Image (tube, helix red, strand yellow):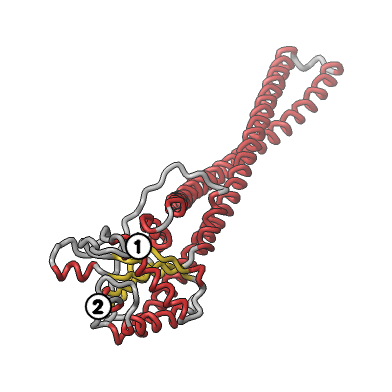
Amino acid sequence: MSIFSKVIIAGLSIAFLGSCVPQKKYAELQKNYDKSEAERKYLSGAVKDLETERNELKAQVEKLTKDLDALSMEHNDVKQDHDLLKDKYKKLDEFKAQLLANQEKSSAVSKMENQQLLKEMIKAQEDLQKKEDELNRKEAELNKVAAQLDGYKSDLQKLEKDLDARSKRINELEQMIADKDAAVRALKDKVANALLNFKDKGLTVTQKNGRIYVSMEAKLLFPSGSTVVNSEGKGALVELAKVLEKQSDITILVEGHTDIDPMSGAGCIKDNWDLSVMRSTSVVKLMLKNSKIDPSILTAAGRGQFVPLDPAKTAEAKAKNRRIEIILTPNLDQLFKILDEEAQKLDPNSGEEGDDEESDDDISKPE
């Protein structure tokens, strides 16, 4: 899969988190994803088709050029024959005039000889007319081929211009994606380095599908059943917030996850949905309080027990599933803008989704 496909999918795959954001936003992101993927594939297919058509037109131009050269040579040969016959006809015409003059003055020239000469003159005149007709036909054919050749050259120039524009557009998109990739890798390194002190305390930093996942086990952040961040968890979140407050071109999604054990007791927390949402909200508020992060790029969401890391029912698996995931996604607004501009020119009829490629790295191995 090309870098283009990987990061397009990376920018859009947040749509798959639809269960933690409003349905309308999910549908809109899904629609943008489908449209951009179809447009990306159509653009690549269109470029290949244009290159094929350009090669075919070049071959036709070469063939027509050879035909034109051959016709030009043939035209010249016919013209030379025509000139020779015309000169011969002129001489015969002069001879005819002389013959008629001699016929009037002398009776020595026989009538048979005169008739033979007249026949030769008539035949020469007929041959001359045939050559003239053939010459005219060749000239018309030559003009037709020349006009057709001009048309192919014009089409080829338009095609190459269109192909250059499309290639330039794709290069622009790929450069933009490469820049986003580099920025994501750099941010992942910054986050990993800032949180190195917590790597053995249930915290990991991974990069996957063009996004950065900071996963913190609940034991690092919260007492059992609580939504209040403890002192150690606050230290990790403050370090992370200091890194993220300097980032203006990302969105931050904070997801709360629980295990499968149901909540017990009374109070404002009724079930695992409430617990997961309240914990993510506590994390967001703490990060905002201790940094200058733009609140508009933050989203708090809860996913209850429905997205486990380990489906087993053991204590170890449950501990792993109780977690907060902070998902950092690059802003792809400019990329969508370019794709929308292309969408006004193109009408893709089909598109297939590509497979996501994953690259997980533990905090102990920053990229």
When the figure is inspected, residue 35 is found, relative to residue 125, above or below; the finding is: below
Which secondary structure lies at badge 2? Answer: loop
Question: In the rendered view, does 307 fall on the left or right side of 69?
Answer: left
Mark 1 or mark 2: which is in front?
1
Task: Name the residue located 38 percent from the left edge and 62 percent from the top edge.
Answer: 6
Camera-nearest residue between 300 and 186: 300
Camera-nearest residue between 78 and 54: 54
At label 2, counting other C-alpha atoms closer than 10 Å, the crowd grade (few under 14, some 14-19, many 20 or more) is some
Q: What residue occupies the far bottom of the structure in this picture?
A: 197
Q: What residue occupies the far front of the structure in this picture?
A: 266
Question: In the rendered view, does 124 fall on the left or right side of 104?
Answer: left
At label 1, counting other C-alpha atoms closer than 10 Å, the crowd grade (few under 14, some 14-19, many 20 or more) is many
At label 2, the amino acid type is: Gly
Q: Which residue is mark 1?
A: 302
Q: Which residue is mark 2?
A: 202
At label 1, the amino acid type is: Gly
Q: CA distance from mark 1 to mark 2?
A: 20 Å
Tell me how many marks there are. Answer: 2
Which secondary structure lies at badge 1? Answer: strand
When the figure is inspected, residue 159 is found, relative to residue 367, above or below; the finding is: above
Q: Quadrant of residue 213 in the image? A: bottom left
Task: Name the residue located 69 percent from the left edge and 17 percent from the top edge.
Answer: 119
Please state the horizontal and vertical placement of residue 173, each as a whole percent of the image. 49, 62
Camera-nearest residue between 241 and 4: 241
When the figure is inspected, residue 297 is found, relative to residue 94, above or below; the finding is: below
Task: Name the residue located 25 percent from the left edge and 78 percent from the top edge.
Answer: 202
